[in-house]
Image (tube, rainbow, N blue to C red):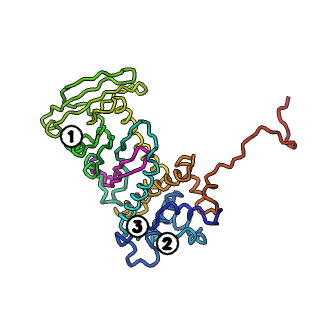
Amino acid sequence: MHTGRILFAQLLDFIPRHEFNRCVRRYRGNHRIRTFSCWDQFLCMSFAQLTGRESLRDIETCLRALYPKLYHAGIRGGVARSTMADANEMRDWRIYADFAQILIAIARALYAQEEFGVHLEQTAYAFDSTTIDLCLALFPWARFRRHKGAVKLHTLIDLRGSIPCFVYITHGKIHDVTALDHLILEPGSFYIMDRGYIDFARLHQFNEVLSFFVVRAKKNLDYQRRVCRSVEKTTGLRADQTIVLCGPKTSQQYPVPLRRVTYFDAETQKRFVFLTNNFALPAIAIARLYKCRWQVELFFKWIKQHLHIKAFYGTSENAVKTQVWIAIATYVLVAIVKKKLNLGLSLNEILQILSITLFENVPILQAFSNNDVQDQGTNVCNQLELFNF
């Protein structure tokens, strides 16, 4: 039975509040705070993500218009633009990063049996980065080029459910391959990457921890073929080889054999060459795994289109990281709601519905149900029949 609570409050039931409080205590987020707690900050910023607010003034105006309902949404502190700006500037972004990781763990458990296009018992990840351009004058810490600023989001997603598991935020000048140093590799898992992540010293570390990688090879690879296996060319495969590196530097950085798989995509008329340290999977599975890497690109496209991360509410590094991590937490929360309520809607459709019903007094399942009346083909007696020949 509906208890009369607004939709925003019902949405928060999917959040483990005690875990959030633990993250706040870990970094003393509410130390000497009287009126605008970390929870208030999180709710206001989540509201901004869910409803697409453009600025702190926009957030303040909308929330003040909803003032009678703020208490029922869980917002206890006064909502002011300057208060939110100070909170984003001063409160440790790691509070929201740690809490996002808790939501990520919940979501990954829910999507553990999700199919992603390749029958694989092990966990498969896709790793890539996206660049968000910034004004260097406003974000001097985010140097990218001489007259341009940017931040990079180095992101690892679980292909089952497209859940972001690792996000490393840097300024734009950091090379993508250095983000591999911050990954905690899981034995037996697959990591799929583009050729920008080829660094054989770093790739050799995957062997050390018994993890697998699939990476697209560069054209100037210096190697020697040791074994050549037969392939079914009707599937697009062109070669399945065991190779060793011959370069004076690469042969020392990666001294053990590699597997080289060549695949021709008839749809795009392109030839792809993949390198992997896994010799057990069929060659076609290696090619299909790399194709699944596109999910991380779709994730970047989705969050840039539907969440507010291309423009920031604050200019400090702490404010930027706070906004990004709350955006990620919002994305994962929507994914959790979708799975727990067994909704047939897409994440985009759920977000669009929430954006206009967030403060409505309606049961959450009713908000996402389709109540459109279907046309049964029956005639209404008082309706004029046009074109009745």
Q: Residue at x 36, y 29 (%)?
A: 284
Residue 374 shown left or right of residue 365 in the figure: right
In terms of secondary structure, what is the magenta stretch mainly? strand
Q: Earlier in the sequence, mark 2 or mark 3?
A: 2
Upstream in the sequence, badge 1 or badge 2? 2
1 or 3: mark nearer the eye: 1
Residue name at image x 30 percent, y 48 percent: 186
Task: Report the amino acid beneath label 2.
Answer: Ala
Query: Residue 291 location, x and y as percent?
Result: 39, 35
Where is residue 30? Give x, y as percent: 40, 74
Q: What is the quadrant of residue 294 in the picture?
A: top left
Q: Quadrant of residue 27?
A: bottom left
- Helix, strand or loop at mark 2: loop
- Please give the residue where the numbered disc 3 appears in the rendered image: 88
Q: Return the residue found at the far right.
A: 382
Earlier residue among tags 1 and 3: 3
Horizontally, residue 5 falls left or right of residue 58, namely right
Q: Amino acid at mark 1?
A: Phe
Q: Locate residue 383: give its quadrant.
A: top right
**Identity of the amino acid at label 3?**
Asn
Give the labeled residue for mark 1.
200
Q: Nearer the viewer, mark 1 or mark 2?
A: 1
Q: Is residue 162 magenta?
A: yes
> What is the CA distance from the residue labelled 1 to the residue labelled 2?
51 Å
Count of number-bearing discs: 3
Quadrant showing the C terminus: top right
Which numbered disc covers residue 80?
2
Q: Nearer the viewer, residue 260 or 220?
A: 260
Gap in Å between the C-alphas at discs 1 and 3?
Answer: 40 Å
Which region of the structure is painted magenta? 148-175
